[in-house]
Amino acid sequence: MSEDQKVVSQFHKNSIEIVKLCLSKWNGKEYIDLRIWIMQNPAEPGSEVATKKGIRLNADLLPKLIDALNEASRILKEKETGDRSPEKEKQDP
């Protein structure tokens, strides 16, 4: 990872893959990088290597990305509450 890259957040996707959200700077421009990293040696901290699986967006697009994620969250919550509707519960034995 370069000096111009800061990890904002990360979480394990599974036992060997980590999803990292980073802020980076390249050619004077700010970017958001959301990428899967592979742990080459899970017993060794810092052994992660970035994969091609991910996206890099101009930081100016952050508000649009947030809006899209909020919309996806709203739709998923709506589906979840719709699946638990009283009518469906009456049908389930």
Image (cartoon, rainbow, N blue to C red):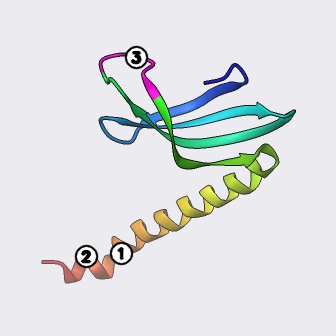
Q: Is residue 25 left or right of residue 82?
A: right
Q: Residue at x 60, y 27 (%)?
A: 7
Residue shown at 45% from the left, 27% from the top: 48
Q: Is residue 68 magenta?
A: no
Q: Which residue is mark 1?
A: 85
Q: Which residues are magenta?
A: 43-48
Cα separation, mark 1 vs mark 2, equals: 6 Å
The amino acid marked with disc number 3 is: Pro
Q: Position of residue 72 (x, y in %)?
A: 56, 62
What's the residue type where badge 2 is placed?
Glu
Residue 43: x and y in percent read 30, 18
Tell me the SS state at disc 1. Answer: loop
Q: Position of residue 55 (x, y in %)?
A: 62, 50
Tell me the number on the disc at residue 89: 2
Closer to us: 23 or 92:
23
Q: Is residue 70 left or right of residue 52?
A: right
Q: Which residue is the site of mark 3?
A: 45
Q: CA distance from mark 3 to mark 1?
A: 46 Å
